[in-house]
Amino acid sequence: MRSTRIGLVAAAAVLALTASACGSDDGGDSGSGDGGSESIKIGIKFDQPGLGLKQGNDYTGMDVDIATYVAKELGYEADAIEWVQAPSAQRENLISTDQVKLIFATYSITDERKEQVSFAGPYFIAGQDLLVRADDSSITGPDTLDGKKLCSVTGSTSAQKVQDEVPGVNLQEFGTYSECVAALVSGAIDALTTDDTILAGYAAQPQYEGKLKVVGSTFSEERYGVGLKKGDTELCQQVTDAITKMVEDGAWQAAVDDNLGKAGYTPGAGNPPTPDACS
């Protein structure tokens, strides 16, 4: 009996040691933060065709393609990206509170924003432009808008800039750009103004293909950057290197063509841009 008891105790000790060793290994793996389950949260727009658009479980657009490329260079495959909606008014807060690691959302680099976040890039130079019906040759720029009906979203600085420059323009403000585009197609308004990339994205949608055109006479400069945590120069440099590589290997041009090319859109002066130094 005594030998049996000794054998059982020894076996139990071996099992305990084995369980302890396995528990130690699991704890080491979960604590390291490495592994296939690791993901990255990236902010994009969910409502901008051609740039950042969510349809069901699918995410498409130039910003999405560029973000996916950059994420892969950082070590994250496409299925490891968690897309987060990044409305314009919430972008700085999403970064500062660590709800996202990066933001690709037609995010113009400005001195005011750099007080709260850092930027890598720019990865694209956009400019304010006009969207008109494809058969309308009367509108060639802001100076030809006198007496015309111009649409933009309520509170848009884009529309206000044009109204200041052309007092005779008849400004129509709608709740969304989609409403403006529908009104343009129907003939209720004559033109829509905002960034040329956004306009090209709408014009490239299947239901509008061939019906709309971007005038192609920009009158502002918007430098789209990648928003990230203020002061994170290491991450900034990694993103900058990825953008540079994307331009050099042709993937940047492919992202532009695939998403905006159907609208006959050609990137304006300064593209592809040279990213700023990280600081």
Image: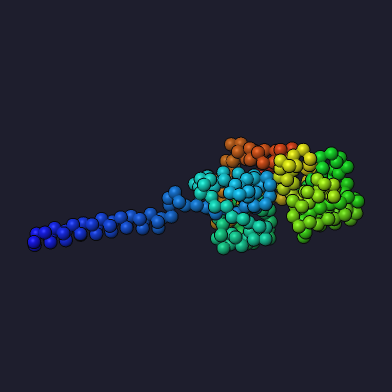
Task: Give the position of the C terminus as an image quadrant.
Answer: bottom right
Q: Residue at x 16, y 59 (%)?
A: 8
Q: Position of residue 75 (x, y in %)?
A: 49, 46
Residue 26 lies in what quarter of the image? bottom left
Position of 189 compared to 97: left or right?
right
Instruction: Pick the residue in front: 258 or 73.
Output: 258
Residue 139 lies in what quarter of the image? top right
Q: Residue furthest top?
A: 250
Position of 234 compared to 90: left or right?
left
Colour approach in the figure: rainbow
Q: Residue at x 28, y 57 (%)?
A: 19
Is residue 199 shown above or below 111? above
Is residue 262 shown above or below 56? above
Q: Position of residue 238 (x, y in %)?
A: 54, 48
Q: Is residue 37 visible?
A: yes
Task: Give the position of the N terminus as an image quadrant.
Answer: bottom left
Q: Position of residue 176 (x, y in %)?
A: 74, 55
Q: Residue at x 76, y 57 (%)?
A: 175
Is residue 262 shown above or below 116? above
Instruction: Pick the residue in front: 171 or 128.
Output: 171
Residue 132 lies in what quarter of the image? top right
Q: How many marks?
A: 0
Q: Is residue 231 visible?
A: no
Q: Residue at x 79, y 40 (%)?
A: 211
Q: Position of residue 52 (x, y in %)?
A: 65, 49
Instruction: Pick the residue in front: 65 or 206.
Output: 206
